[in-house]
Image (cartoon, rainbow, N blue to C red):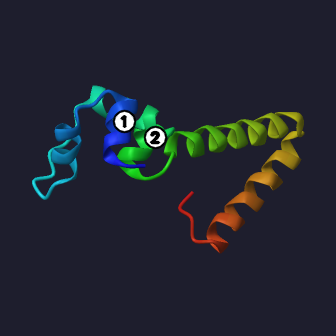
Amino acid sequence: MLLKELSALSGVNLNTLNNYLSKRGQIPSVEAGVKIARALGVSAEFLVFGEETAKKEVRANGEVRAIIRIAKQLDDGKRRFALEMMKLLTRAVDIKP
């Protein structure tokens, strides 16, 4: 996509877009960033960080909730065993519990 097209789609002035991309590196306002992101079909977070961390967090939180839901169904002995297995796993892949 050309900057002229991005300007037309986003409503952000062409000279302003050029300033964002110049060596001066002017940083877009939040409003302009959101407009540009929408025009490009990505999130503002993606423009800033290059990835969608929020989606990863949501997926991770869903997995954590699933682990908790399963753990609640276990009796005390099996829950302790599962916890010990998870501790061993974190040590095996060098994750701090």
Residue at point 63% right, 70% down?
A: 91
Q: Residue furthest left?
A: 24
In front here: 75 or 23? 23
Q: Position of residue 13 (x, y in %)?
A: 22, 32
In front here: 46 or 69? 46
Above-or-below relation of 38 to 63: above
The answer to whether residue 34 is visible is: no
Q: Amino acid at mark 2?
A: Leu
Residue occupied by mark 1: 36
Image side of residue 12 versus residue 35, left or right? left
Tag 1 secondary structure: helix
In front here: 23 or 7? 7
Q: Position of residue 6 (x, y in %)?
A: 37, 39
Q: Amino acid at mark 1?
A: Ile
Q: Position of residue 57 (x, y in %)?
A: 57, 42
Residue at point 72% right, 58% down?
A: 86
Rendered image: mark on residue 81: none
- How far, Cα to Cα, is label 1 from label 2? 6 Å
Rendered image: mark on residue 40: 2
Q: Position of residue 21 (x, y in %)?
A: 22, 52
Q: Quadrant of residue 59?
A: top right
Do the CB atoms of the residues marked 1 and 2 lie less than 8 Å apart?
A: yes
Q: Quadrant of residue 94?
A: bottom right
Image side of residue 17 versus residue 90, left or right? left
Image side of residue 64 versus residue 97, left or right? right
* Quadrant (top left, top right, bottom left, bottom right) of the C terminus: bottom right
Q: Label 2: how many residues lie within 10 Å, few (<14), some (14-19) or many (20+)?
A: some
Residue at point 72% right, 35% down?
A: 65
